[in-house]
Structure formats: structure tokens, C-alpha cells
Image (cartoon, rainbow, N blue to C red):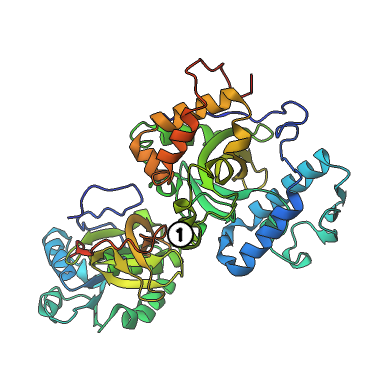
Amino acid sequence: MYAVNIEPHVLGPKGSVLENLIDVDEHYVAEMQDRALVLAEDPLRCQSLPHMTLAGWDLLELLMEQQALGYPEHFTLTRDGDRWRWINRPLGIDDTFTFGDVSTLPYGPMEYITRQSQGDFCILDQRDGNLWMDAGMVTTQADWSLDFDIGMNFFEWHAPVPLAHEKGIFVRALKFLTNIQQGKPARRLNWTMTVNPRLDTSPENYHKWGPDRTTVTPENVGDKVHLRVELQSFWRLPRSNGIVFPIRCYLIKMDELVTQPKWARRLHRVIRDLPEELVNYKGLTRYRPTLLEWLSKLDDGSPTSAGFGPD
Amino acid sequence: MAAKSIISRPVYATLSPQPGKHHLFVADAEGALAITDLAPKVPDGFFADAHIIFIPGNEGKHVAALEALKPAQLYQGPSFASALPRLKQTLANAHMGLRLYLAGTEGLIGQAMQAALEAGIDHTSIQTEHRGSLARRMQCVHCKGITENVTTQPATCSHCGLLLLVRDHYSRRLAAFQGVCINAEDRSEIPPAEEIFR
């Protein structure tokens, strides 16, 4: 049911989301516009406690380096000592600033760069043998609130997750994460489901997107219901000794997912066998029967091969 | 006592005397009894270095019992809000060696701890003891308004009016439990409110 499914974050096949360690894809401009809209409506989605500014600079450096490395046609970073020039062609940005001097950027360093990077970002401070959620840019989340959780430690912000505490998942995960080394990032995948391709499934807006869950019918399930996969990676930050935790969300609708017969069979079995606590936690309760009935027709009972790649 | 819950929900112990130069108590109503129960366990001269900030509440009881401890300072306030400027000043002027003791309702403990956190005191160094009501302070995750003294499940947000599930998930920074719309998916579903946080 649960695993500490963490592995080294190393480059994967060309053309996959792992072609670069920070993935920029065809939704880049749209996702950045979506983020700007969410922030205009609710600025509390981006917060950084006062001691986290240095970690924000660490993150700015990491994201500029990685995006420029992977996509030189879109991003260019040139450095002359502390004088940095950042060119972001898709968003039409060309800024020169002093690294470490907040007054030379239009936002704090974390907000500046995460307005230009796909995925949510949590920056964790490491102290007292724990990790503390002390800064973040969170506009595309699966039902958790940065505004509520900021300042909490690893166990506290995971408190609402059912069953995993008892299984020792978080103790082991924390041990691993507090030992992440510079230059050796790690990753894991997480999943849930979303009705309609919404990125902002925040608790703040639950009363706005929640009704979507009542709209799933046998006729529209293939189009409306999406598997939401989060690629979470973990990076040690060099100056602050913090950890940055990007949470990159990918959505695929059922009609697309079932074009791979292996994926259709496996998802059917996962949804069918999911413990009730997780069904509720993931918010599937209301439309699970409709989804199961639809998926069951695509499961002939034959085995699925190992791994998540298609056959 | 509160029932077994999730990890973010605060747990409270029994006040015990800590080594320190000054002892700051913040208590409301029956929280005074946690202080008087502590008194037999303290070393000589303990209360001569103590400052008690007490909010007696409507019943106005227990003041005499606190006076009998002969603290260096005893303040009575009509509400936590009225005591807060004094608490903040005391924390701002505090030196190394100040120990903090909070006793009473969860709302009082939470808000006094919030002021202490803002003053840079580590929450694990603070003594707490719960006495009295289990009424909750709740942040509405939707409109961010705080509703005080929530006793029912679900509860109506006093700001935006949404009907909220009062979760056990708790934020020390906000000194509040989280309230999330209980019928967000279908507003016509209205579960009956039960008084469970007394």
C-alpha cells in the first residue's frame, strides 16, 4: 500500500520527463500564467519565514542553472561575480541583479524564480534532527494548505495522512531526507486523482472545485477523470543547508491513460484494492464506483509487467 | 482529556517547576488550579521570581488562591486580547532564564504560545497544562478568518458562513485548528451539528 519509494534523481530517457532534472514542457507559459492568477487571488500561497531568505537564493541558483542547462534555447544565465543576468525568453524576461541583494529583484528570490518554474516548491529548514516547512510556493497542490502548514515539522505536516505513520514510513523517509547530499538529489512519485484538468486543487478553493466530483458519469469518466502524478524531488541547498522539495504535477485523462492496456489493467486493480482510508483521503469516494465500472471493462485479468513503463 | 488523535494535535502535560531565573505564567479560569497544584512542588523563593497573567473569566474564581502564592506580579485581565500587549512586552524584555508556563483552555494556551513563538521561544521549552473547556479556535481554510470557542462538529465559520469540518490538524503558528468545508462537493448535504468540544 505504501512504500518509501525514493530513488536517486538521475537523468532518464530522452523525450521523457526525466530528460532533464528540472523538467520544462509545452505547458510552461500556461502554467506560469495560471500561477500568476492564483497568486493575484491569494498571495498567501507563497510564504517564506524570515530566516529562509538565504535558502531562497539557493533555490534561485538551482532553478536558473538547471533550466539554463536543460533548455539553453529558452533560458540563459550569465554570471560576473555577484552580478547575474537572467534571460527567460518564453516569458520575455531579461533581468540583471545582484545575487544575495533582495532589493535588486522585483520579488524575494524564492518567489521570483518560482514564478518562472513549473511545479510547487517547498523549502525545508533542517534543525533538531527534523525538517521544517518554512517556505514555499504552492499553487498546484493536492488539497493541502501552505498557509496552515508553514512552520510545521515533517511529522506535523504529514499528520493527516492515514496509515503511514503507523507503518513507520515517515520515520524512514525523514532519515533518508536529512542525509541528502549536495549534488545527489533524490526523487519519488506520488499520486491521486483529479476531476477535470485543474492544477489548483487547494483546500482554500475546495468549495469551488469540490462540486466537480459530483459530475462524473459513465459517459464522461474517460474525459473528466485524471490520474494526477507528482514527481517529487529532493535537493540539498548549499548555503542554507536546507532541502528544496519541488512537487511537479502531471495530469493524464483516463481516455489517454487507457491507450496503454497495461496502464488500464493496473489502474483498475489499484483503484479496486485501495484501502478505504486512502479512498477517502484521496477524495475518490464519490466517483470511485463509476470509475471502477468503466476501468473493469478494460481489465482482462492478464498480468502486468514490472515497472511503470508501457509494454 | 482529549482523545487520541493525529500528530499535529497538541498534547498537554502537567506543569512542573523548571530551573530558571524568572517564571512567567499565563492562565485562564481553571488553569489557576494547575498553578496552585504546582505550588507544593516548587523550591523556596520560586514565586518571588514569578509573574502570573491571569484571565479569570465570567465566574471570576481562583484569584485569591493565586494571590496566596505571593507572586512578584499578579495581573488580572478581562480577556486574552486585553492581556496580550502586556504578555508581548514581558516576552520582548525577557532575558535568558525566563521559563514559561501556560495553563487553561486550549485557546489560551495556543494564543500565548503563539506570542512566545513570535518572541523566539522554542515551543518544546514551554510547560503546558490543559484545564477547562475543550472549545477550539478554528481557522477557516477558505476565508482565513478565525472563529473562537467552537464547540460543535461541524461548525459555521463566523466570517464567511461556510459549514466547516473541524479537523484535528493544528497550527501552532496560527494557534488554531483547521476548518474545511464539510459539504463542498454537494451543498445540499447538511450534517447535523453535535456539541463535542465542551
Percent from the top left, x then y, of residue B78? 25, 84
| Camera-side residue of A46 and A289 | A289
State the residue in front, B141 or A158.
B141
Give coordinates of residue B147: x percent, y percent: 34, 72
Q: Is residue A38 left or right of residue B179?
A: right
Image height check: is A247 above or below B38? above
| Residue B196 found in image quarter | bottom left
Give the chain letter at badge 1.
Answer: A
Residue at 82% x, 61% y: name it. A97
Taking the spot 66% from the left edge, 36% from the top edge, the residue there is A182
Residue B119 visible at all: no
Task: From the viewer's perspective, tell me whether residue B70 is left or right of residue A44.
Answer: left
Q: Is residue B103 above or below residue B58?
A: above
Q: Specify the quadrant that holds the N terminus of chain A.
A: top left
The spot of residue A126 in percent (x, y) is 53, 45
Question: Label 1 is placed on what type of residue?
Answer: Phe
Query: Where is mark 1, residue-wise?
Result: A148
Residue A226 visible (yes or no): yes
SS at mark 1 in the image: helix
Residue shown at 58% from the left, 58% from the top? A51
